Image: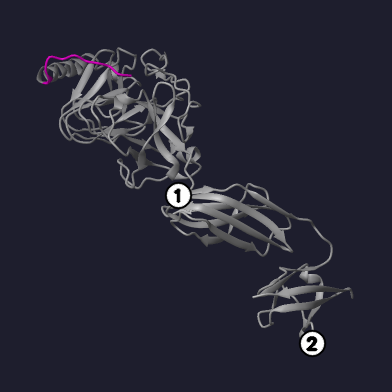
Amino acid sequence: MNQNYTISSKKGWISMAVSSALLLVGHFAQAQEGSQGNTTIFGGAQMTFFSNHNFITGGGGAQPGVILTERAAGNFGVLNFAGDNLTSTGASDAGYVDGYVRKYGAGAFVFPVGDNGFVGQFAASADGVMGAYFHADANTAVTSNLFTGSDYAALPSGGPFATSSMGTNVDIVSTVEYWDIDGANATPLTLTWDTGSAIASLTGSNLAKLTIVGWNGTQWVAIPSKVDVTSVLGGSSDLSAGSITTSSPLAPDTYTAYTFASLILPLPVTLTKFTAAAESRTVVLNWSTTEETNSDRFDIERSSNGKQWSRIASVASQGDSRVLVNYSHVDASPLAGQNLYRLRMVDLDNTFAYSQIREVSFQSEKGIAPYPNPVVDKILIRDHELVKQIDIVNTSGVKVIKNQQPSSAGIDVTTLPQGIYIMTMTLFDGTINTHKIAVTR
């Protein structure tokens, strides 16, 4: 929502604002004692702070706590901060400006805005930027009017803003909150979040997916932005609290509203093939890439149900490549029944994406069986607890392993030359099973 104000000069405006501020504080002293806040700025009125303000200790002519301003479109109240490098500190869910704040002067400024018991600060540095926070679903864009006890019509003008209408690479748009930020001068814009913003749910706990989006009149479009290592509110940015800033300055008037969204991340690699196939009692995974950019590794994940996944191996990637690269891995101990596999393709900055899922199933069988086959180092025996002893002979009939009782650790065949062998398994019930195995290197 873009609101224009006409003034003869900045000096004259400041003089008028001082008078307005004094009148407001004096005239509404009794009304300010109510639950609507410690200071109230009605529609069409303005109050100006010429120095720093702390929402815990007060200052600038206002008591600590909430400062309530009218939000009605075309007739809202405004709290101004006029001066270079001013600060507003101590904002919280218990103390903030419930409505519009404008800054005049140079220097980055954190706007102490909130809505109905929820603080939602943003930051900008350009002179004349103004904005408000809405703790509301953008699909309705309706918030409570604390002056009347009812609801405002959709705000800002142009709302509501359908979160299902999204631009390229936007996956999910927040339905928790949004901001109306106005101004003609280009500036970096910073949005902040806390646990109530549900960033973990929005991004699937992948902070690399987080972006700022703006409503361009028909849809939410991604604005290039980056999570701040150190939040503008202090502390490290993580899924529970932090801030994100646009990569380049922009005029806030470019978009009608702003909020958070989750991106569809491009794959760190171009995956052209991913297969999983059963070979004896193992699963052979093969995949190929034709392009890799800053790729770090492939984490191989396995699941029996598609819900709980575990990493069973990692394979280093080529890193940067523009040619065909082939990879493989053997799962020597697959699960009985269904085995689901996926690749977690991890970039150097720990961003990642998943491949499609591949399935290999092993039917339940009675009796015992050695695996893998062919074997390199150890033969594992399914249902090994039923086996009394194992003997292995070579093709010349020489017994190379004899009277060995198997365990879950398997049977070590690293000392055997490469070749074909016959394994005889004697069970505790007297049954004898034989299997041909191949030892390879």
Task: Give yes or no for residue 344 being in the magenta stretch.
Answer: no
Residue 4 is one of the magenta-drawn residues: yes
Q: Where's the N terminus, which quadrant?
A: top left
The stretch in magenta equals 1-10
Q: How many marks?
A: 2
Q: Residues within 10 Å of mark 1 (few under 14, many from 20)?
A: some
x and y, in percent, of residue 426 in the image: 84, 76
Tell me, yes or no, if residue 381 can be seen here: yes
**Identity of the residue drawn at 28% across and 14% down:** 42
- Tell me the element at label 2: loop
- Of label 2 and label 1, which has the lower sequence position? 1
Where 43 sits versus 344, above or below? above
Residue of label 2 = 398
Q: Where does the image place residue 132, in percent across and percent down from the top left?
A: 33, 25
Tell me the element at label 1: loop
Q: Residues within 10 Å of mark 2 (few under 14, many from 20)?
A: few
From this viewpoint, is residue 338 visible?
Answer: no
Classify residue 127 by image quadrant.
top left
Which residue is label 1 attached to? Answer: 351
| Rendered view: 188 above or below 441 | above
Q: CA distance from mark 2 to mark 1?
A: 55 Å
Kind of residue at badge 2? Val
Which of these two is toward me, 284 or 123? 284
- Drawn side of residue 123 relative to residue 82, left or right: right
Residue type at mark 1: give it: Thr
Query: Quick one: 331 or 108, which is closer to the camera?
Result: 331
Left or right relative to 319: residue 275: right
Classify residue 70 as left or right of residue 332: left
